[in-house]
Image: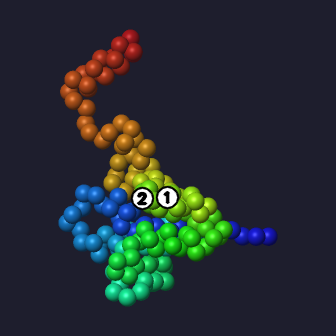
Amino acid sequence: MVTIFQEFIVDGYNLLHKLFPDKPQLSLQCKREQTESMLLGVQQSTCQKVTVVYDGQCPRSPFRDGGAVNRVFTSLGYSADEWIIDYLKSLGRNAQMLTIVSSDHLIRRHAVACGASYMLSEDFIGKYFSGPKGRDITGEPRNNRKKFGSGQLSQKEVDHWLNVFSEAKE
């Protein structure tokens, strides 16, 4: 029996900026820690390895931290995008065991060309970072926020719908 091992390769800052678009008060370190904590939950719930790749933090060669969630900090001048693309190419046919998490068009194109799967960061957040009762990490209903908006109805809209439903009861 052949077991196919699945691994998520996450474009770290791409995902982080999608998770915390309105949180300038949080430090980058804090955002990374929270992101990695959530990725650890994904790893535990899916039983799939998670590797998160961050842009240029190391002066020499890429730094790999094999903690609970595998972290890669690329060398200065070598982007996470480049690292992910090179990693995909290095795996050859084994790239099909990966799911690349990024909203970056170039990375997604390379994933497809190498036979890997990909998931937009926004879709990954919606699928794996949902809170209780189908709510996402912001507390909004996961499926309705984009479709219906999260703003309140105007008084005119409320009156209209009260009128519609009052007529329906009669």
Side of 100 relative to 73 (left or right): right
Q: Label 1, label 2: how many angstroms apart (C-alpha)?
A: 6 Å
Q: Residue at x 33, y 54 (%)?
A: 138
Determine the residue located farthest toward the bottom in the rendered image.
Answer: 60
**Residue 77, labelled with which disc?**
none
For residue 133, say whether it is visible: no
Kindly indicate the quadrant of the structure image that contains residue 58.
bottom left
For the residue marked with disc 2, what is the amino acid? Asp
Q: Quadrant of the N terminus?
A: bottom right
Query: Which x, y percent locates residue 61?
Result: 41, 86
| Residue 49 on image: x %, y % | 55, 72
- For disc 2, the neighbor class at 10 Å (few under 14, some 14 to 19, many from 20) is few
Q: Position of residue 21 (x, y in %)?
A: 28, 58
Q: Indicate the amino acid at tag 1.
A: Arg
Which image quarter: residue 6? bottom right
Residue 55 makes an appearance in the image: yes
What number is the disc on residue 104? 2
Graded by Cα atoms within 10 Å as few (under 14), some (14 to 19) or many (20 or more), the crowding at tag 1 reads: many
Of 145 and 1, nearer the camera is 1
Q: Residue at x 39, y 38 (%)?
A: 147
At mark 2, the secondary structure is loop
User: How many numbered discs?
Assistant: 2
Query: In the displayed structure, would residue 146 be above or below residue 34?
Result: above
Q: Are marks 1 and 2 in contact (CB under 8 Å)?
A: yes
Numbered badge on residue 108: 1
Classify 123 as above or below 163. below
